[in-house]
Amino acid sequence: MPFSRMRIPLSVALACAGLLVSACARPSVGSDRDDPTKPVTLRFWHGWSAAGEVKAIEDSVARFEKRHPHITVKVTGNVTDETVNQALRAGGDEAPDVVSSFTTNNVGQYCSSGMWADLDPFMKKTGVDKEKVFPKTFLDYTSYAGKQCALPLLADSYGLYYNKDAFREAGIARPPRTMSELERDAVRLTRRTGDGSYERVGIMPNFRLYQNSPDRLFAQWGPTYFDRQGKARLARDPRTKEFFATQRGLIRAQGGYAALERFRTTFGEEMSSQNAFLTQKVAMHMDGEWRGLMLRDKKAPFRWGTAPMPVPDDRAETYGRGYLTGTVAGIAHSSRHQNAAWELVKFLTVDTDQVVRFANAIHNVPSTKAALKSPGLDADPAFRTFLDIARNPHSTAIPPSVNGGQYIVALQDFAYDVEAGKVPDLDEGLRALDAHIDADTLQSEN
Amino acid sequence: MVSTALAPPPGLRRKRNRERLRTLGFLSPWLAGFCVFFGYPLIATVYFSFMHYNQIQEPDFVGLRNWTYVLTQMPLLGPALGNTLWLVVVMVSLRVVFGLGIGMLVTRIRTGAGFFRTAFYLPYLAPPVAATVAFVFLLNPGTGPVDEILGAVGLPAPSWFNDPGWAKPSLVLLSLWGIGDLMVIFMAALLDVPKEQYEAAELDGAGAWGKFRYVTWPSITPVVLFAVVTGVVQTMQYYTQALVAGKLASGVSVGPGTVIQPGYPDHSTLTVPQLVYSLGFQNFNTGAACALSLVLFALAMAVTTLLMRRRAGLLPAED
C-alpha cells in the first residue's frame, strides 16, 4: 500500500494509541464525603511482622473496633513501602484505606504526589491541634511543603548498644561520649586471634552493616542537607567533611577498610541470632530502640547497656542527641471512606493511652507529647535512654524531599566510595554529590 | 491511457482483495497479540519518555528532560551499562562455549549417558531465586563450605558475591551451573549432523579438530546463532539473580521501611533492568524509566542486528 494511502489510517491509529496511553495515566480519586458513623469496612496495611508486634497492632485495632463498633478493620501486615506505593498507584477495590510506613524517608514523595491525603482538613474537622499533640521534630518529618499527609505512629531513636562485659574486660568505665573517646575505646575493645584476624572489633564503622547508614551517624553532627532554595548543601557544610574524617579515622584505627569489610562479610543476618552484636563480634553498635527487645528475646549471653551515640568533640554540649525516624500513618488518596479512615489514624496516633500501650508492647518511642511524659511508659533503663534521645532538642530527623529518600541513597552510595578510599578529592566528590542530588530533585519535580 | 491499460480487471482485483482479507484473517490473532503486547507498550514507552509522570498525577510534557537526565545526569548509568555489557560478552560467550562442550561430551559418552544428561540438565530446573540463594550460601566467605575447602587445600578464598571484582564472575558461575537449556539444544544439533560426513572427513584424513571445523561447526552454526541471540536478549534483561545475590550477600535485612538498593557490592551487580525497575517502581520516575528502557531496546536491537549479519559468520552464506 503506498504511504500516501496509509497516512490517514496510521495517523488515526497513532492518535488512538496516544489517547489510550494518556487515558491509562488517570489516577483513581477517593472521597472524604463518607459518614464515619455508618457501618464500614476499612483496609489497614502495616509493616509489622514479628509475632509480638503483630499481636500488639491487632490488639490496638481490637480496641479501636470496640470503641467504633460500626467500623470493621481488615488488617494486612508485613507490607513494604514499595508494595504500598505500587498498590496505591494501581488502585483497585482491595487497595488500603489506611496506610503506614516504617520510614519517614518517603513522606515528601507521599505528600507531593498526593498519594497520601492531606490530614490537616480532618484534624480541623475533629478539633485536633497538631502543634499541641506532637513534638515539632515529629511533625516536621511527617509533612512536606506545608502539607501534613502523615502523622507519627510511634518513633524510633538511634543510640549506642555496648557490651558491658567487653567494656569491663578492657577496663573502660563508661560508654564514650565524644568521637575521640569512641575511637579510643574501639581500639581497646578490638581483639584479634593468633593469626591476626579479628575476633571482635570495637565498633564496625563500615556503612554497609545493618543500621549503619551514613545519615544516622551524620545526625550526631546535626547536618543541614538543603538550603532555603532546596538545593543540596553538603559540599558547603564543613560538618560533612568532619563527619567523613571521623568515620575514616575509626576505620584506620581498627585496621583499615579492607580488613574490616572482610570481617563484616562473616557476620550473620541482622534480625537473626547470628547478629554480630549478639555473637559478640562487635562490642559497640549503633541501633534503634527496638533492638533491646530482640536482645532480651534472644537471651544475649552477656550484659549489655545503652547510651546516646557520641558527638563530635567540639560539640560536647549536644551529647544526648541522636537520629530520629519512625513509623508514619496516613490515609490513601484512593480511599472512599476517608472520614472513617481518619478515625482509625486518629486513634492510633493521637490517643495517649493507645500510644503508650502500643509503645510499651513493641518497645518503640511514643510520638505524642503527652505519651512521652506518661508514667505508664516502660521503666526499663535501657529503653529510657531512647526516650531521652527522642526528647533531646538536638536530635534530628532527615528532612522530607520531593523524591523521598533518594538523596539519602545518593549519600549512601557516595559514603561507600569514601570509606573504601575511592574518593581522592572529598571537596570535588561532595560537589558532584550535590549536583547529583539537585538533578534528582529537579527530575522529580513537576 | 497507460494507467488504465495496466490496471487489473475488476474480477482479479476482487479476488486479490478477498485473498488479502483471508490472509489478514489468519494473521489477526498474531496481529492482535502483537499490537496489545508489543505495539501498544512500545508506543506507551515512547510517549512516557517525554512526560513527567509519577503514576499518580497527570502526565506533563517535559520535552527531552528525561533523556537528558538519563544520558547525562544519572551517575549509575555508566556502571549499569558496563555491567550489562560485561555480562553480555562474558556470560553469553562462556555459556555458549560451555553448553557446546557439555553437549559434545554427553553425546559421546557411551556409559551412563542418561545419567550425565539428566545430571547436567537438572540444575536448569531449579527456580532462579532458589539457585541464587544456594550459591550465595555456598560461596559465603564466612560460613560457606567452598571457601572452607579452598582454604583447607591452601588456595586463596575469594569473597565471591561480597567482592566487587568477583561478584560478576560468581554470577557467571551460577549461570554455567544451570547450563541444561543450552546443553539440550546443542545435543540435538550435534546428533543431527550426518554421520557419513564424519566418515568422509576421516577418509580425507581429518583429525578431531578438522572434523569439528569442517563438519560439526557448519552444521550447528544456526543453533549457535540462536543460542547467542537469545542469550544476548536474555542477558540484556538480567535481573533476578543479580538482585537476589546482591541483597543476600549484603547481609541487610530487607523488610518494611527498607528499600532494596540493587548492585551490591559497589554497584558491581547493577544491571540496566534493575535501574529501570528502580527508576520506574521505586522512585516512580516513569519518564526516565521509559527513556532508559528505550536505550536498552536500541542496544538489544543493535547487537542482534550485528549478529544477524552474514558477515558475523553465524548465518550460512546464500547459495
Image (cartoon, coloured by chain):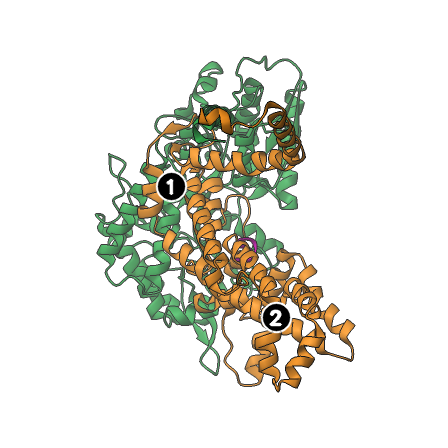
Chain colours: A green, B orange
Res. B100 mark = 2
Amino acid bearing label 1: Ala
Amino acid bearing label 2: Leu
- Quadrant in which residue A46 is drawn: top right
Q: Residue at x 41, y 55 (%)?
A: B81
Residue B92 locus on image (x, y percent): 53, 63
Structural crowding at the residue carrying mark 2, measured as other residues with C-alpha within 10 Å and reported as few (<14), some (14–19) or many (≥20):
many
Whether marks 1 and 2 lie on the same chain: no
Residue B90 locus on image (x, y percent): 49, 66
Q: Main secondary structure of the magenta part?
A: helix
Residue A270 seen in the current view? no
Residue B280 is left or right of residue B37, and the answer is left
Q: Nearer the viewer, residue B270 or B29?
A: B29
Q: Magenta stretch: residue B243 in it? A: yes
Res. A397 mark = 1
| Span shown in magenta | B238-244
Q: Chain of mark 1?
A: A
Residue B293 is left or right of residue A180, and the answer is right
Identify the secondary structure beneath mark 2.
helix
Structural crowding at the residue carrying mark 1, measured as other residues with C-alpha within 10 Å and reported as few (<14), some (14–19) or many (≥20):
many
Q: Chain of mark 2?
A: B
Residue A235 is left or right of residue A250, and the answer is left
Q: Is residue B160 above or below residue A246?
A: below
Residue A162 locus on image (x, y percent): 46, 60
Q: Is residue B166 above or below residue B66?
A: below
Q: Magenta stretch: residue A24 in it? A: no
Q: Nearer the viewer, residue A63 or A237?
A: A237
Mark 1 or mark 2, whichever is nearer to me: 2
